[in-house]
Amino acid sequence: MLSIDALRVAYGGAVEAVRGVSMDVPDGKVVAVLGSNGAGKSTLLRTISGTLSLHRGRVDAGSVRLDGADLVGRDPGKIVRLGVVQVPEGRRIFGRLTVEENLRAGGMASKDKSAKAAAQERVYDLFPVLKERTSQRGGLLSGGEQQMLAIGRALMASPKLLLLDEPSLGLAPRIIGQIGEVIAEINRQGTSVLLVEQNATMALGVADLAYVLDVGEVSLSGDARELARTDEVQRLYLGHESEAPQERTTAAPRKTLSRWTA
Ligand SMILES: Nc1ncnc2c1ncn2[C@@H]1O[C@H](COP(=O)(O)OP(=O)(O)O)[C@@H](O)[C@H]1O
Ligand SMILES: [Mg+2]
C-alpha cells in the first residue's frame, strides 16, 4: 500500500533529517517506527502527509507511493482524500471546541454524510469516554482523552492508512496500554497503521513489522516480535541489559532481519 523508497528530507539549508530511508506499510498491517529524539520519525510522517512544507522542510530525493501514486508534492488535503490521515505529535486538538466539534472538523474533507455518520459511530464505539463528553471542551479533557480525541478526529476522515506520531507521549502506563489496545482494534477494523513511537514496548506489542530509525537512517527492520528479541532493541529501547540472553535464536547480533514484501 505505502512504499517509501530512498527518501531524503532536509530542513533549511543544513539539517538532513531523513537520509535515504526505504520502508513499506503493507495493506492491513501495523508498522512501527522506533527511534530516539531527533531520529527523523516526525519528519517521515510529515513527508507522507504532505505537511512537510509547513515546517519548511523539503524532499531532496526518493519517493513516497500510495498504491503506486507518488504523494511527494501533493497538498495535504488531497492526501487526506486519498485516505492517509496523520495524528500529529502533541495531539493538536482544538482546546476551545467541544469534543463533537473537534470530531466534525476531522470529517470536513469529506462530503459523504453517511460515511461521516458511520465514522462518528465508530469513534464513539472505540472511545465511549468521548461519547459521554460530546459537549465538553477539548482543552478540559485529560491527556489520554485528548489523545483519544485526536485519534478519533483522524478516524472521521475514514482513513485507509492512519499515521500516529508518538501517541503515548506524556501518558501514564495504564493509558498507554489502552491506546495500544485501541490501535489494535482500529487495525482489526481494516485500517493500516504507521505508528511512530519512543515507547518500544507498546509499539512492538501492537505492530506486525517494525523499523528502527537512527539519525535519519534505518538501522534495523523486520518482524516486530523478532525485532523485540534483538540485543540492540532490548538494550536501547526496552531497557534491558543483554548479559543473559535467553530465548535467542542466533548467537551473533544481526544487523538486518528478514525483510518482507509489500
Ligand atoms: N522544522 C524544523 N526545522 C529545522 N530542523 C528540524 C525541524 N524539525 C525537525 N528538525 C530536525 O530534524 C531532525 C529530525 O527531527 P524529527 O523528525 O522531529 O525527529 P523525531 O520525531 O524522531 O524526534 C532533528 O535533527 C531535528 O532537530
Ligand atoms: Mg517527533
Image (cartoon, rainbow, N blue to C red):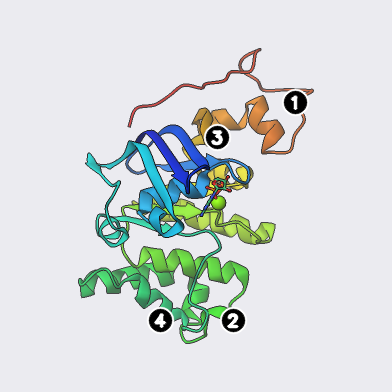
- Name the disc covering residue 242, or none: 1
Sequence order check, earlier mark of 1 and 2: 2
Q: Residue type at mark 1?
A: Ser
Question: Which numbered disc covers residue 101?
Answer: 4
Quarter occupied by residue 261: top left
Residue at the image position 28 percent from the left and 57 percent from the top: 75
* Residue shown at the point (57%, 30%) measured from the top left: 227
Secondary element at image label 4: helix
User: Which of the two discs, 3 and 1, labels the residue nearer the N terminus?
Assistant: 3
Q: Earlier in the sequence, mark 1 or mark 4?
A: 4
- What label does residue 32 carry, if any? none
User: CB under 8 Å between callouts 4 and 3?
Assistant: no
Question: In the displayed structure, does residue 22 sit left or right of residue 107?
Answer: right
Relative to 211, residue 179 above or below: below
Q: Which residue is mark 2?
A: 140
Q: Amino acid at mark 4?
A: Glu
* Image coordinates for residue 14, horizontal then vertical, percent: 52, 42
Disc 1 is placed on an element classified as loop
Q: 250 or 86: nearer the eye?
A: 86
Q: Which residue is mark 3?
A: 212
Determine the image quadrant of residue 70.
Answer: top left
At 50% across and 42% down in the image, what residue appears? 32
Disc 3 versus disc 1: nearer the observer = 3
Whether the residues at callouts 1 and 4 have beta carbons within 8 Å, the answer is no
- Label 2, secondary structure: give it: helix
Q: Residues within 10 Å of mark 4 (few under 14, many from 20)?
A: some
Sequence-first tag of 4 and 3: 4
Would you say residue 192 is visible in this rendering? Answer: no
Mark 3 nearby-residue class (10 Å; few <14, some 14–19, many ≥20): many
